[in-house]
Amino acid sequence: MQSLLNKKILLGISGGIAAYKTPELARLLIQGGASVQVVMTEAAQQFVTPVTMQALTGNPVYLSQWDSTIPNNMAHIELSRSADAIVIAPASADLMAKISLGLADDLLSTLCLARDCPLLIAPAMNKQMWEHAATQRSAQRLNANGVALLGPASGFQACGEVGMGRMLEPSEIAEQVIAFFQKKSLIGKKVLITAGPTFEAIDPVRGITNHSSGKMGFAIARAALEAGAQVHLIAGPCTLETPLEASGKIIRTNVTSAKEMHTAAMNAADCDVFFAVAAVADWGIAKPSKEKIKRQGKEAPNIEFNANPDILVDVAQTAKTKNGKPHPYCVGFAAESTDLEAHASEKRKRKGIPMVVGNIGPDTFGSDLNELLVVDDAGSKKIAKAEKLQLARQLIQLVAKKI
Ligand code: CTP
């Protein structure tokens, strides 16, 4: 699925070394289905050539407000009227200052002032320039004017310093542009998600866990945030970064065992939608040893298990009926080795929940790709193989229609 299909993006490039990454951004936007029109400042042309951008986008590149090839000679009006969004990457400190004050002395800044479409900018500069009070004031003014700031990130800089001011990677900018165009179907809704594996300790150094990477649950968290929801993500042991943390709309609770995940989920069960994506251990160790169990002179130990609570069932049992629908709306996941549809339907009935999503394919753990089978009261429906984030976006829109 191309998430930017039929979108026209005006890609502005200002002067900064990060401009060497902008051709890759153009390529990713085009791959997403967008048509891309490039406008460059004079300084940008010191870092990347108009020929490169023209070859990649298949469109002429505009460099001046005095371009006589535009029929009415008003490039700033013509170009901004035909765009669904203006994306500037990199946005230099100078350009940020200029557009935050409404100055318009070249084609790109004039376009920004004359636009009637959203403006998204990806700042890129040396950390001292980013931290300077004047740049921070520019950023605040831009925020107040409704301009979306994508980044910057922190890390190694071209000047050899390390700190805040790096342009986001092209893939992250492209993802944020896609996110910007997502339907805001969960505004005002609270979404609770369990994700990743659990770990049941045998002793202080050993334990029982599973192959869940957490990627699907984290992708659902991101897609829910993109749709405008407030998200509480309860994560088992995994190293994934919290999605869109800077949005301030996500709470993450890290847990280890199934019992801890159960407690955290029950404390947060007052929500609109619950996605139980975690691969929860069905059994915990009855008496974990406080000390490491030594091998020497010992037989293989007999480990006694006891059943863990079913988080999904317990949250579903707190559900009330609101406008004729269960509240929270609970979505379970099923990874099966055989008869996916039959097992998913059985699980839906047994757990008393309205929707179960089955993972199709044996390679789902750890992979970035997946294929889903959604089973609800209307029957079953496949969501074709795609990246987990794309699947999550489709699933969020499906669930949003249900609540
Ligand atoms: N689940 C849960 N708490 C548990 C076990 C499972 O919340 N203790 C949730 C999972 O997050 C998933 C769904 O229940 O959404 C199905 O999990 P699965 O392990 O497939 O189901 P089980 O009930 O354990 O059934 P079985 O192992 O027999 O397939």
Image (cartoon, rainbow, N blue to C red):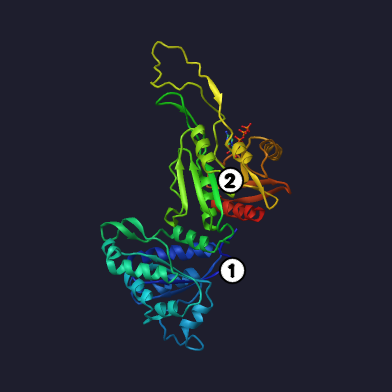
Q: What residue did someone put label 1 on?
A: 6
- The image position of residue 387, as x and y in percent, is 55, 51
Q: Amino acid at mark 1?
A: Asn
324 above or below 87?
Answer: above
Q: Which is nearer the N-term, disc 2 or disc 1? A: 1
Quadrant of ligand 1 in image: top right
Residue 91 is at least partly visible in this image: no
Q: Is residue 352 left or right of residue 277?
A: right
Q: CA distance from mark 2 to mark 1?
A: 33 Å
Count of marks placed on residues: 2
Q: What residue did someone put label 2 on?
A: 274
Q: Nearer the viewer, residue 55 or 13?
A: 13
Q: Identify the residue at image location x=42%, y=56%.
A: 246
- The image position of residue 100, as x and y in percent, is 37, 74
The N terminus, quarter of image:
bottom right
205 above or below 370?
Answer: above
Q: Quadrant of residue 158?
A: bottom left
Secondary structure of the residue carrying tag 1 is loop
Secondary structure of the residue carrying tag 2 is strand
- The image position of residue 262, as x and y in percent, is 53, 36
Q: Nearer the viewer, residue 24 or 311?
A: 311
Q: Nearer the viewer, residue 164 or 26?
A: 164
Q: Amino acid at mark 2?
A: Phe
Q: Is residue 345 left or right of residue 202?
A: right
Residue 45 is at least partly visible in this image: yes
